[in-house]
Image (tube, grey):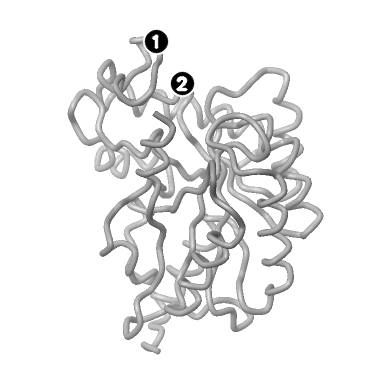
Amino acid sequence: MRRLLLAALAIGVVAAPGVAATRWPGGAKAAVVLTYDDALPSQLDHAVPVLDAAGFKGSFFLANVRAQDVARWRAVAAEGHELGNHTIFHPCRAAAFPADPRYTTEAYTPASMLKEIAQQNVLLTALDGKTRHGFATPCGETKVGGVDYLEPLRASGLVTYARGVSASSAELAADTGTLDPMHVPARGFGEGDDAARMIAFVQQAETGGGMAVLLFHGVGGDHLAVTDAQHRAFIDWLKAHRREVWVTTLQQALDWARGERDRGAEPR
C-alpha cells in the first residue's frame, strides 16, 4: 500500500524552457517549497528543528492533530512556518487507505467536505492567528462521493490554494506565472528516497526557472518516512545553495509568482 501511494506522489512543478519563467527574489534560479503532511510527531521532532537551524520556513498541512501537540504547532506557526488545511479526518478512498467507513471519500459529499475544511480553518486560526490558509488534498484525491470538490472549494473562498500530487508531465512543465492555484502539484519523497533525488528535483526546477514543491510525510519516523539523515543532508545542500534557490512557504511562492505575472515578466 505504501509503495502504491509513493508511486502516485511523482510530480512537482517547474517552468519549462521558453515559457515566462518567474523572476524569483534575489535573482534565485528557482523557488523551493518544503511541504509536510498529516501533522506527524516526527515532523515536530526532526523536520522543524532542522528548518529552524537553517533559517528556512516550511508549509505544514495539518490533519488529525493530537491534543498533546497543539502547543507545539502553535510554536511552529510563531516561528514563521506556514500551517495549512489538510481536513480534520484526512478522508481517502477506502481501497487506498484503511479507515473508519465514516471517514472515507465515499462517505463524503462536496458539501460535507467543505464543511470539514471550514471547521479545520477554525483550528488553524486558533493556532496561528491567520484568516487565510492554503489546502492540501488528502491522498492527493479531488473527488468525494464520486464528485470533484475543487471547483466548489474555489467558489467557497475557504482556502487560497489547493496543493495536490500529479503524474502529469504537462504539469511538470507548468509556467508558474499562470499556474492555477487550485491545482498545485507536488512531488512526494518517502521511503527509499535520498538527498540526491531531492537535489536532482530542485536542479530540474533551476533549469527552467520554476518552482520545486516537495512533499514529505514522516521524517525519521511515522509513515512514508524519509530518514532524518537524508532530510538533513538535503537541507544542508539548500543552505549551501541559498543564493541559487529561494526556500519559502507555498503561500509566499504563489503570491510572488502571481505578482510577477501581474507585472508582466518577460520570457527568458
Q: Is residue 128 above or below residue 222?
A: below
* Residue located at (58% from left, 33% from top): 124
Q: Quadrant of the C terminus?
A: bottom left
Which residue lies at the image location 31% right of the left edge and 36% below the top edge? 141
Assign a secondary structure to mark 1.
Answer: loop
First in residue order: circle 1 vs circle 2:
2
Q: Identify the image quadrant of residue 14.
A: bottom left
Where is residue 65? Give x, y as percent. 60, 24
Please tell me whether mark 2 sits on a helix, a strand or a loop.
loop
Three-letter amino acid code of the residue under disc 1 = Asp
- Label 1 or label 2, whichever lies nearer to me, is 1
Say which mark, if any, is on residue 17. none
The residue carrying pointer 2 sits among few (fewer than 14), some (14 to 19) or many (20 or more) residues within 10 Å by Cα, namely many
Q: Quadrant of residue 104?
A: top left
Quickly name the residue at label 1: 100
The answer to whether 119 appears left or right of 59 in the picture is left
| Relative to 245, 99 lies left or right | left
Determine whether, in the image, residue 162 is placed left or right of residue 48. left
Query: Would you say residue 131 is visible in this rendering?
Result: no
Callout 2, which amino acid? Phe
| Residue at x-position 54% and y-position 22% | 64
Measured as percent of width and height from the top left, residue 169 is found at 28, 62
Between marks 1 and 2, how big is the CA–CA gap? Answer: 10 Å
Q: Which residue is label 2 attached to? A: 89
Q: Are marks 1 and 2 in contact (CB under 8 Å)?
A: no
Does residue 44 show up? yes
